[in-house]
Amino acid sequence: MNNKLLVIGTMAYDAIETPFGKTGRILGGCATYIGLAASQFKTQCGLVSVIGDDFEKAHLDLLIGKGLDLSGVHSIPGEKTFFWSGKYNNDLNSRTTLETQLNVLTKFEPVVPEHFKNASILLLGNLDPNLQIKVLNQMEKKPNLVVLDTMNFWIESYREKLNEVIAKVDLISINDEEARQITETHSLVKAAKKLMAMGPNYVIIKKGENGALLFDKDKIFCAPALPLEEVFDPTGAGDSFIGGFVGHLSQCGRISFEEMKAATIVGSAMASFTVQNFGTKSLEKLTIPSIKERIVAFKSLTEFEI
Ligand code: AMP
């Protein structure tokens, strides 16, 4: 297994409204959050994405400065970058999409750079399932781990293609609402079983401030979310989670349920930073000692003797 991690997803501009404030156009996109989270680990992380000519150089410099390989990021002249705006409800656990402007995404033909075709981990971030398949098909051989993330937007309109992708991946990571939507099942344990019956050997169900569940065919691991005094903006929490998850697995070079348990805690730690500030601000400033400190906090949160 090599330490190459390939990520496909959106690079975007977002406008976010939470009970604590409203942003203008800020940097977002699932590939952006995933890349920033994964860049904290010893991994060669490449992004496959698309941007318009309105994408700011300062934002490209930020990602390059974090060591991310952007040779798979395609820029389309005369077109605008993907734009998403959303508004969170008071509980911060649910949100409404106000606007999705696909822009460059409608013209995107993903091309995996030659040097990433042998990546050991492929993360198919939240995107059109047709594009996710195209990237999977360009890999030289099947990666050691293929992870899929998706959201209601794609579940509602691209169901058939999405089922095709689900059948081909090793792990699916989605939130509780999406798991129920795909499987039409209320119980998350049953939903995870139904998802595994569709293809993946592992399922992660994210439950926002209630943590995350990791399943394989016979085991369940439950990770808490860190109780925080202040949560400003949950945008990108799921992407930061999965970025930290695959970043950890890529760094340690082992794919097993036991290692995924640790990766789930690492991912939860990364998500806990993201929600403490608007957009990517927390991830941009993150340091290794602060990540280590937070993982220790997670450990002591759940440790007990009986
Ligand atoms: P999360 O909060 O983890 O679901 O991720 C939020 C990010 O997903 C935002 O930065 C958005 O730009 C991006 N996003 C929103 N809608 C979509 C979509 N339909 N496809 C891909 N990315 C999206």
Image (spheres, grey):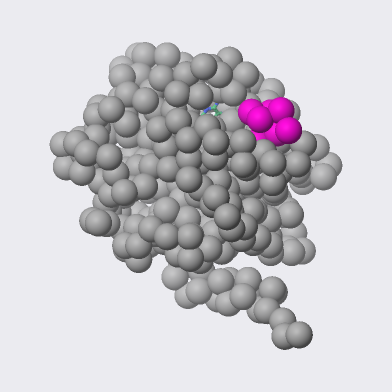
Residue found farthest to the right: 90
Residue found farthest to the left: 114
Q: Is residue 104 left or right of residue 48?
A: right
Camera-side residue of 296 and 26: 296
Vertical relation: 79 (above or below) 279: above
First to last magenta residue range: 179-185
- Please identify the quarter of the rendering in which residue 53 is found: top left
Q: Pinpoint residue 16: horizontal percent, then vertical percent.
A: 66, 35
Residue found farthest to the bottom: 305
Q: How many marks?
A: 0
Assign the magenta stretch its main secondary structure: helix
Q: Pinpoint residue 278: horizontal percent, then vertical percent.
A: 62, 47
Q: Is residue 106 magenta?
A: no
Residue occupying image coordinates x 61% and y 60%: 221
Residue occupying image coordinates x 22% and y 39%: 141
Vertical relation: 23 (above or below) 96: below
- Please identify the quarter of the rendering in which residue 78 is found: top left
